[in-house]
Image (cartoon, rainbow, N blue to C red):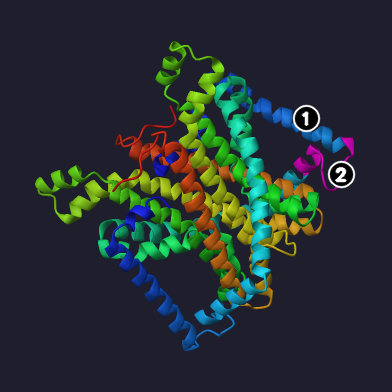
Amino acid sequence: MQDAVTLTATPHLASRVGGRGRAVARNLFPFLVMGVLWELVARSGIFPRKLFPRLEDVARAFVDLTVSGVLPHHAIETLLRLLSGFALAAIVGVTLGVLMGRTRRMEDILLPLVSILAPIPGLAYAPLFLLWFGPGEVSAIALVAFVSMFAVIFNSWTGVKAVKEIWLRSAEAMGANKHRLFWYVIFPGALPYILTGLRLGLAQAWRILVAVEMLASVPWGLGWLIFGAREFLNTDAMLAGIIVIALIGILLEKYVFQRIENYTVVRWGMMESNTR
Amino acid sequence: MINIAQGVQNRRSVVHAVATVAAAAGLYQALAMSGVFTQALLPKLQTILYTLIAMLADGTMERHAAYTLCRVLVGFALATAVGIPLGILMARFKWAENFFLPLVSALMPIPSFSLVPLFMLWFGIGNLTTILIVFYASTFPMLFNTWTGVRAVNPLWLRAASCMGADERRIFWNVIIPGASPFIITGMRQAFLRSWIAVVGAEMIAASDWGLGWVIFDAKEFLQADVMMASLVVIGAIGFVFERLVFGSLERLTVLRWGMVRLAKG
């Protein structure tokens, strides 16, 4: 039940647009209002300009950092770290989840461990990982992988278990061997859940990564940029970094996962399209 | 999180679960005793247990937990107070949706931790920053689920209710709210999980003197892996209790009783 709700509860921007031009205007309007509000507060002088920069300061910091190549470098390092951590989580998580769904023994062995480890917030493991692997790249990637793995495991496991019994039996009756059964029935059947898991996992990896970069003192990375900028009161650079983080987050959601979903499960008719 | 109860339902599974946990603990203990890693990095189970008991006995652990819980609850309450009404507003009125949806969609992908340094500059180190981070982290799941839930209320019920002469107010309280409640409760659940994660991170970075996140990070400085592990146990236990007991019983009292969802069956 909870899973079905989670599935439908994920946000979809593009689903409610009418005419294109009007839609763009309508979507921009709230940002305009917020921008004006921000500018008003910034110019009123309640906060010192150093702490609450005007929009022009943020824009200038953004342009300067982008032109000098600092911001892209940070962003690329962060993305690489995200991808390697998440790839690890996806491979291990889907494998474990499918195994747990298919064999009783694996389920008995892994489920208790997973259910004990999963509810602990990922960041709480961070100091432990830092002690074990030392500050730097290895701890950051290991932690991102470890934390995002659980959503993948749970959803793959549920997905495999949710494959209709009757599909399995009819495939078997039609003479499918184990191999075919897995690749043509079980895997596609579980795919909507697996994709949901991957999506949740990626979102979690993304959230945790920024914090990990602050704690693990890696030389480059958006989290580190923000954290480092604090030392010098560079609020404008911090806000520029936060904007990049938001942009990457939106792009990941819209262009990675909605795409995958549309190409696979929606086309197979397993799930309704969210982008009408 | 989904079907653990169901998965571990029968006796055989319980026995197996206990056996695996025991085996994992034994493995850990063997690794700790083998001396491959130093005691400081990989403390023995009894050391962790002693530390936990000692910290519980002198009240420090309770105090850390109380501070953390307090921050979570205040932030969570704020998020409920903002997220649910705003979600309902967005679902009921087109203008609210048009205005807030783009903003929410742009703000939501920003991880709450990335705001910690900024909030530290603005609000200083301590309670205000951590509470606001919790608030930020938990508002969005609440808002989105409420919004989806209200829109997902079966239009047939609405029409039936208005045919039977219910006024706006009655429809809202007796049809829409109960109809959206499974989503709202899911939202609260997700929001709580998020805030529980956020508070630990916020406490680590925007450190004050108390709090479970702070104590873990502080213990790292002194290589006290036993304190870290003990705090991890407490963090896990509190999260588990809330997820199972609080939200589980909330669900049982409301949506299950109203027949909105059935208990998951295998």
Q: Where's residue A57, x and y in %?
A: 80, 42
Q: Where's residue B55, x and y in %?
A: 64, 73
Query: At 64% from the left edge and 55% from the top edge, which residue is drawn?
Result: B69
In the rendered image of this protein, does residue A164 appear above or below residue A226?
above
In the rendered image of this protein, does residue A222 appear above or below residue A22?
below
In the rendered image of this protein, does residue A128 appear above or below residue B68?
below
In the image, what residue type sits under mark 2?
Arg
Q: Residues within 10 Å of mark 1 (few under 14, many from 20)?
A: few
| Residue denoted by label 2 | A49
Viewed as shown, does residue B141 lie left or right of B60?
A: left
Closer to us: B58 or A228? B58
Closer to us: B199 or B162? B162
Residue B247 sits inside the magenta stretch: no
Magenta residues (range): A44-60
Query: At 36% from the left edge and 69% from the top edge, which residue is drawn?
Result: B18
Q: Where's residue A222, x and y in %?
A: 65, 54
Same chain, labels 2 and 1: yes
In the rendered image of this protein, does residue B14 appear above or below residue A36?
below
Q: Quadrant of residue A105?
A: bottom left
| Residue denoted by label 1 | A36
Q: Residues within 10 Å of mark 2 (few under 14, many from 20)?
A: some
In the image, what residue type sits under mark 1?
Val
Looking at the rendered structure, the secondary structure element under dot 2 is: loop
Q: CA distance from mark 2 to mark 1?
A: 16 Å
Q: From this viewpoint, is residue B85 visible?
A: yes
Looking at the rendered structure, the secondary structure element under dot 1 is: helix
Q: Where's residue B61, x and y in %?
A: 64, 68
Sequence-earlier tag: 2 or 1:
1
Query: At 48% from the left edge and 62% from the top edge, which residue is drawn?
Result: A146
- For disc 2, the chain is A
